[in-house]
Image (spheres, rainbow, N blue to C red):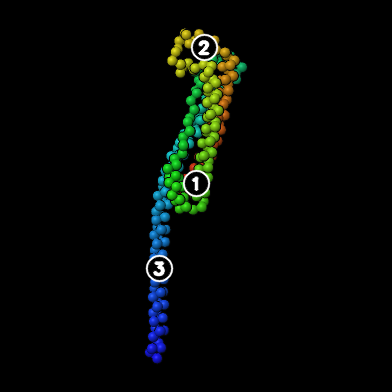
Amino acid sequence: MLNEGNPKKYLIYAIGEILLVMIGILLALQVNKWNEQRIDVKQRKYYTQSLMEDLRKDTSILNASIATAEEDDRKLMRIAKRLSSPLANEDTFKLVSRTEIVFIYEAYRPPSQNTFSILQSTGKLELFDKEIYNDILDLRIEQDRYESIHHSATTNLQLAIDHLKKIRIPYELSLIKGQLYEENYSTVNSTALFLEFNNFITTKFIVNQYITIARRRVLDNTLNLLEKLENG
């Protein structure tokens, strides 16, 4: 009877050992999962803070750029209003074109992409929930669209500037000043100068408007994402 019971005893013992091994494996897997989750939480917190810093910098730059463009447009509108007045004449135009024109425009300022580039290259974007993940990608789409619009718009503006510069150099930027400059400036084709000047200020006004719309879209997406990260 004892011999008959031994196989059963060993079978129970073997099953017990198998169960212990399985429990050990499951515990090890669970501990490993806990560790991975803990690491993910720590990394998500780090990247969230880094991403918020980038977004705050971008917000400041975008707000400043929008304000600059709006002030420039107000100046252009004042020039247009002055030259549209029934009292405006050729002398008024020559004075305005020489002293109030500004050829410069704000260069494209790329967004802060350090954190996003790391997240994208390492696959760490998956650390964020679906809503934040999609918001980050949507922001990048708007940033790329803004860059494309800025390049296209300022290219057209530069063409208008180049045409106007072929006619004259503004007095305040000219190295040569005085009577000789005045005598030569007086021979400039006023009609051509007026048409190119009008083309320039109109183009610049439209470009400012066009780029500002693109900037505002990026700013809206930036603020939306920043608010969600801050409240997350």
Q: Which residue is mark 3?
A: 25
Q: Residue placed farthest to the bottom in the image?
A: 1
**Can see residue 7?**
yes
Q: Secondary structure at mark 1?
A: helix
Amino acid type, label 3: Ile
Label 3: few (<14), some or many (≥20) within 10 Å?
Answer: few
Q: Name above or below for residue 117 compared with residue 26.
A: above
Relative depth, front residue between 89 and 54: 54
Frontmost of labels 3 and 1 is: 3
Which residue is located at x 48 percent, y 30 percent?
A: 106
Pointer 2 with pointer 3, Cβ within 8 A? no
Q: Name above or below for residue 232 compared with residue 2.
A: above
| Mark identifier at residue 136 | 1
Gap in angstroms between the C-alphas marked 2 and 3: 90 Å
Frontmost of labels 2 and 3 is: 3
Relative depth, front residue between 14 and 209: 14
Position in image of residue 131 (x %, y %) = 51, 51
Q: Which residue is mark 2?
A: 185
Position in image of residue 157 (x %, y %) = 54, 27
Amino acid type, label 1: Ile
Q: Name the quadrant containing residue 31.
A: bottom left
Residue 139 lies left or right of residue 46; in this view the side is right
